[in-house]
C-alpha cells in the first residue's frame, strides 16, 4: 500500500509518502517546510501569513516528497490530509490541494484528525498492548486519551485553560527568550536548578484528569516582579523550575490515569513530547509501573505529514477508502466534541 499524506494545520507545510510491503511499514519521505523563522518576529503564528506561505509552499513540498520517495501519482492507493483541528485558513490549503490531486489523479482522499495522527505516530512498527493511555501535549492541546484499539479512543481529560506548549511559549516570552519557547526554555533549563524557585503544581491533586497551566505562567510572572533576574544563571534556574513544575503535573496525572483504566501501555505525543526531561522522567515513571512506554521519534513529534500517513495506514487497514466512500472515512470527527 502506498499513501501520499499532506499536513498544513498550523505553520508547517508538509508532505509524506508511506509504503507498506508484506507488513513492513515505512515512511519513505517526510518533507517539512517550517515557517518558524517567519513567525518568530511576531512572537506567535499569524494565521493570514501562515496561509499565504502554505499556498506558496504546498506544490513544491508535495513534488519533493514524491521525488524523494521516487514515486509517481499512479503508485498511490489514496491521499490522506489533515482536515482539523487547526487554523482554518491553513487547513483549507492542504485540504484543497489533496482534493484537487484526488480529482486529477483519480484517487480517493481520506481526512485525518490532526490529534489522532499525533497519537498514531506511536503505532509505527510497534506491537501495542491495549488499553493504552496517551498524553497528547502540543502548542494547542494538552489531553489524556484512553485508547482501546487502533481506532477506538476517548478523551478523559484536558487543559481547562492554556496548553502545556503554550505555557512554554508564554514563559519564554516573559523571559524574552524568543519563539517557539519550548525548545529554548528546555535548553536553558538543562543548565538550571529545578529547586531554585518554588512554583505551584496546578490541579495536581484535583482528582480528575484535567490540567491548568495559565496559573503557572502567572506564578512565573509574579516571581519575576518579586525577584529581579540578574544574570544568565538566574534565567536558567527559572526555566528549570518552570519546566519541572510542568513535567511533574503531566507525569502525576498520566500515571494516575494509567492506574485507573488498567492501561498496559503509555504513549506520549505532540510537540512537547520532544522535551527530553519529560521523555526521560515519564519513561522512568511508566517503567516503574511495569507498563510499556512509547514516544515517537523526534521527527514525528512536531507537526509533520509522516504522522498523517501513519494514521491513514491504520485506518485503511480497517476500511480502505474508495472513490465511492472517501467522503465518509475520517479519523474521529468528534474528537473535539466529547
Ligand atoms: O505539535 P506541535 O508541533 O504543534 C501544535 O500542534 O501545537 O507543538 C508545538 C509546541 C510549541 O508550543 C513548542 O513550544 C512545543 O511544542 N515544544 C516544546 C519542545 N519542542 C517543541 N515544548 C517543550 N520542550 C520542547 N523541547
Ligand atoms: Zn500538532
Image (cartoon, rainbow, N blue to C red):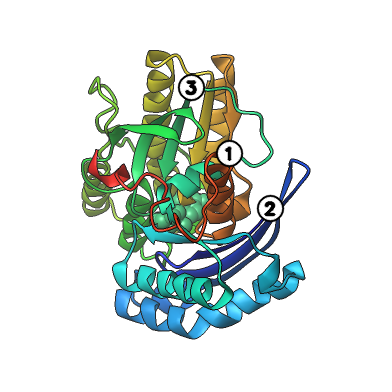
Q: Which residue is mark 1?
A: 295
Kindly identify which numbered label has been placed on residue 150: none
The disc, 2 or 3, on the residue closer to the chain's N-terminal end is 2
The disc, 1 or 2, on the residue closer to the chain's N-terminal end is 2
- 74 sits to left or right of 13: right
Where, by quadrant of the figure, is residue 181 drawn?
bottom left
Q: Position of residue 166 (x, y in %)?
A: 33, 54
Secondary-structure class at tag 1 = loop
Mark 2 and mark 3: span between their CA atoms? 27 Å
Q: Position of residue 137 (x, y in %)?
A: 41, 44
Q: Which residue is mark 3?
A: 131
Is residue 48 or residue 237 the one in the foreground? 48
Where, by quadrant of the figure, is residue 11 drawn?
bottom left
The residue drawn where x is 48% and y is 70% is: 98
Mark 1 and mark 3: span between their CA atoms? 16 Å
- The answer to whether residue 192 is visible is no
The residue drawn where x is 53% and y is 47% is: 311
Q: Which residue is mark 2?
A: 1
Q: Position of residue 18 (x, y in %)?
A: 66, 56
The residue drawn where x is 35% and y is 42% is: 142
Q: Position of residue 94 (x, y in %)?
A: 44, 71
Where, by quadrant of the figure, is residue 62 drawn?
bottom right
Mark 1 and mark 2: span between their CA atoms? 25 Å
Secondary-structure class at tag 2 = loop
Amino acid at each position: 500500500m502506498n499513501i501520499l499524506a499532506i499536513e498544513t494545520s498550523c505553520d508547517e507545510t508538509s508532505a509524506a509518502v508511506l509504503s507498506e510491503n508484506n507488513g513492513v511499514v515505512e515512511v519513505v519521505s517526510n518533507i517539512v517546510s517550517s515557517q518558524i523563522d517567519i513567525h518568530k518576529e511576531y512572537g506567535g503564528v499569524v494565521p493570514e501569513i501562515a496561509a499565504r506561505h502554505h499556498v506558496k509552499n504546498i506544490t513544491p513540498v508535495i513534488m519533493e516528497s514524491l521525488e524523494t520517495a521516487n514515486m509517481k501519482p499512479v503508485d498511490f492507493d489514496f491521499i490522506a490530509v489533515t482536515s482539523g483541528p487547526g487554523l482554518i485558513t491553513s487547513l483549507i490549503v492542504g485540504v484543497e490541494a489533496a482534493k484537487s490531486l484526488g480529482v486529477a489523479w483519480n484517487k480517493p482522499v481520506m481526512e485525518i484528525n490532526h490529534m489522532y495522527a499525533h497519537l498514531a505516530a506511536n503505532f509505527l512498527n510497534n506491537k501495542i498492548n491495549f488499553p493504552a493511555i496517551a498524553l497528547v501535549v502540543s502548542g494547542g492541546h494538552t489531553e489524556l486519551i484512553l485508547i482501546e484499539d487502533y481506532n477506538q479512543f476517548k478523551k478523559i481529560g484536558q487543559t481547562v485553560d492554556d496548553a502545556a506548549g503554550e505555557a512554554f511559549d508564554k514563559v519564554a516570552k516573559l523571559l524574552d527568550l524568543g519563539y517557539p519557547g519550548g525548545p529554548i526554555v528546555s535548553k536553558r533549563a538543562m543548565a538550571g536548578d529545578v529547586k531554585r524557585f518554588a512554583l505551584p503544581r496546578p490541579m495536581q491533586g484535583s482528582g480528575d484528569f484535567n490540567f491548568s497551566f495559565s496559573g503557572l505562567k502567572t506564578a512565573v510572572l509574579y516571581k519575576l516582579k518579586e525577584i529581579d533576574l540578574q544574570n544568565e544563571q538566574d534565567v536558567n534556574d527559572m526555566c528549570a523550575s518552570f519546566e519541572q513544575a510542568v513535567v511533574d503535573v503531566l507525569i502525576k496525572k498520566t500515571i494516575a490515569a494509567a492506574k485507573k483504566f488498567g492501561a498496559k501501555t503509555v504513549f506520549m505525543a505532540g510537540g512537547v513530547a520532544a522535551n527530553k526531561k519529560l521523555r526521560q522522567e515519564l519513561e522512568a515513571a511508566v517503567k516503574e509501573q511495569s507498563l510499556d512506554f512509547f514516544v515517537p521519534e523526534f521527527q514525528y513529534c512536531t507537526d509533520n505529514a509522516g504522522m498523517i500517513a501513519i494514521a491513514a495506514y491504520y485506518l485503511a487497514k480497517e476500511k480502505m477508502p474508495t472513490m465511492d466512500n472517501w467522503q465518509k472515512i475520517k479519523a474521529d470527527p468528534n474528537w473535539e466534541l466529547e
